[in-house]
Amino acid sequence: MTASLCIVFMLVLLAASVPFWVVLGIGTVALLLTTDSLPLSLLGEALFDNVDSFALIAIPLFVLTGDVMVRSKLAYKLLDFAEATTGSLRSGFGTSTVMGCGFFACISGSDAADAAAIGRITMNRLVERGYPLPYACALVAAGACTGILIPPSIAYIIIGLVLGISSATLFLAAFIPGLIVLAAIMLTNAVLNRVFDYENSRRRFSWRAWFTALNDAKYAIAVPFVILGGIYSGIFTPTESAAVAVAVALIVGLCQRTITLKDFPAMLATSARVNGVILPIIAVALLFAQALTVLDIPQQFVAALTTLTTDRTLLILIMLLIFIIAGMFMETTPNIVILAPLLYPVAQQIGMDQIHFCIFMVTSLGLGFITPPMGLNLFVVASLTGQPIMTIARYAFPFVVAMILISALIGFVPQISLWAIR
């Protein structure tokens, strides 16, 4: 009852627009004071220990890599290569835009960074090709959802830390599911394009143009190859690969004179701001999760769910519904830190592999980036174009349906998540 009152109090603070990490901090202190689950004297030490992790160093480094790619114009060359690859399709530039989001996801590990970078480059060109501006916003927002689904991903680093799983293993397992989501968004765009006749590309595919674009983008393509190749081959840990990727992107930008030493403070400030949002949430949320565990809340939660039903199909659907609703109201990081310890025992109860559970959870939470009221990607593209959030959300609805279907498929077919690691 005490824990429930603390959670209600936290919801009231959230409704009053108090920052989430502050809400978690106040709620955690209230929980410790009223339940004696953990000594309050351990608060400072626990907060430091929660972020004292080598794996977390990868987060600011991946964000910094993405910023370097944008400022050095390497991201533009990735998009030009994507357009040379798919530009001859009827929905050519729309498909190229989604593919560009996938390329950038292999670098930044962040949805918001993906949406901001690709949105700045493609939005006007999408409108020129015949797409309504709200639909163009929805397309970029949906494509950018792959930022946390295609490795390297900040979300997989965090869930690996919470559940004690190697992020390199999660990166390997997540690659195929991430590509499936990317393909689903491309297919949805192609269908909508055929129904509403937004774009009708008459451009013919040219091998010469494709090889020219590949040559121009060779250094840009090298960065995700360094990241993923180093991780999958075992040469680098995810953190080491992030550091190498930053070095490669900086060297290329400096050699091509697309960035200068004067750009360094701004790039470091961007990475620091993103890190300053994520790490306080992780520090406090992990302590909150530890207190809930001491109070046997996860076990009680499992008992409550399994009292409702023991059917595997229904429990997977219940978990999917919880992830979707949670993603609508909270960011991915606190959702992972709070819900993963609660729902992983439920997954164990029905025989779900821990890797499969992680992929299922992150993919389902990815929906939250294009669903109001939180919808971070919707806010990013709205800030770029001035379009109303709900207008963009209406155009994004078909992409939400497609992602729900893929999330359910991943939940019910474990081989999609486990094939690569087995």
Image (cartoon, helix red, strand yellow):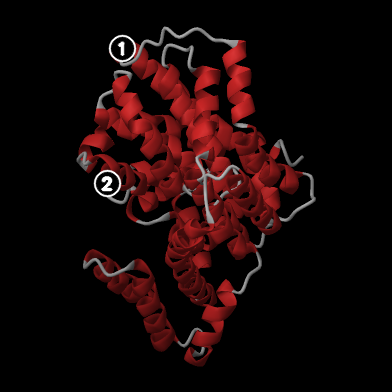
Q: Quadrant of residue 58?
A: bottom right
Residue 186, percent from left and from top: 46, 24
Label 2, label 1: how far apart the Cα atoms are: 27 Å
Whether residue 357 can be seen here: no
Q: Nearer the viewer, residue 343 or 59?
A: 59
Q: Are marks 2 and 1 in contact (CB under 8 Å)?
A: no
- Quadrant of the frame with the N terminus: bottom left
Within 10 Å of disc 2 (Cα), the crowding (few <14, some 14-19, many 20+) is few
Amino acid under label 2?
A: Ser
246 relative position to 381: left or right = right
Q: Nearer the viewer, residue 49 or 317?
A: 49
Residue 116, percent from left and from top: 39, 44
Whether residue 378 can be seen here: yes
- The residue depicted at 61 percent of the width and 64 percent of the height is 57
Say which residue label 1 marks.
197
Q: Is residue 198 above or below residue 415?
A: above
Q: Is residue 281 above or below residue 131?
A: below
| Numbered mark located on residue 81 in the image | none
Secondary structure state at the residue bearing disc 1 = loop
- Nearer to us of marks 2 and 1 is 2
Say which residue label 2 marks.
383
Residue 199, percent from left and from top: 34, 15
- The residue depicted at 44 percent of the width and 58 percent of the height is 335
- Quadrant of the frame with the C terminus: top right
Secondary structure state at the residue bearing disc 2 = helix
Amino acid under label 1?
A: Asp
Residue sitting farthest toward the bottom: 41
